[in-house]
Amino acid sequence: MTARRTITKKELVLRIAENTQQKQTVTRDIIQLFIDEVINELARGNRLELRDFGVFEVKVRKSRKARNPKTGAEVRVPEKRVVTIKPGKKMKEEINRHAEAELAAELAASAAHAMGAVAPAPIPVNDEDAPKPGPTGPEMNR
């Protein structure tokens, strides 16, 4: 299984700015406006449907009784509102496609290992996983 990493808003801004050839500040402001609008709609209790991405909803989690694990004392957990997301079709398909590709690579590597062969380098799933080109020409001798 490949290592997971956290992608920040800043990284998304950089990628989108590059893909759209917009300034990073403009891209950042648009993304922040989008995030603010999503939060505002959910805070109003509205359901937000973004086709292919997912449906965001606010649901009420009822109050309940729980126990303090240290003391064993019974405590009351108050009712609260939580955001839920039901993934859209495209999101589900893309996540499963990546999972299947990773599983196939892992199976190939374990089969090669079992047969005593050297496993091939993993196929990059995205540009970040691709090998970076090394220096060429005069820079090589530096």
Image (cartoon, rainbow, N blue to C red):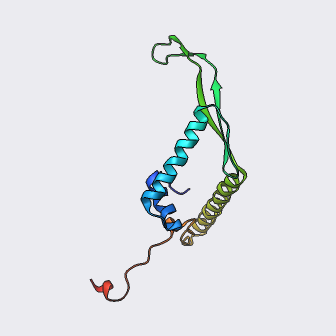
Please identify the quarter of the rendering in which residue 107 is found. Answer: bottom right
Q: How many marks?
A: 0
Residue at far top of view: 73
- The one nearer the camera, 105 or 68, is 68
The percent position of residue 71, horizontal first and vertical second, equals: 46, 13
Relative image position of residue 87 (x, y in whole percent): 68, 46
Q: Residue at x 49, y 65 (%)?
A: 128
Q: Is residue 132 visible?
A: yes
Residue 108, position as x, y percentages in the image: 63, 66
Position of 138 relative to 27 (above/below): below
Whether 33 is drawn above or below 65: the answer is: below
In the picture as drawn, the residue positioned furthest to the left comes out as 142
- Asked if residue 133 lies left or right of residue 96, the reply is left
Instruction: Judge whether residue 5 can be spotted in this image.
Output: no
- Please tell me which residue is depicted at 48% across the width and 65% down the height of the picture: 22
Of residues 127 and 106, the one nearer the viewer is 127
* Image quadrant occupied by the N terminus: bottom right
Q: Along the line of sight, which residue is nearer the eye, 47 or 10?
A: 47
- The outermost residue toward the bottom is 137
Q: Quadrant of the C terminus?
A: bottom left
Residue drawn at 46 percent across, 54 percent down: 28
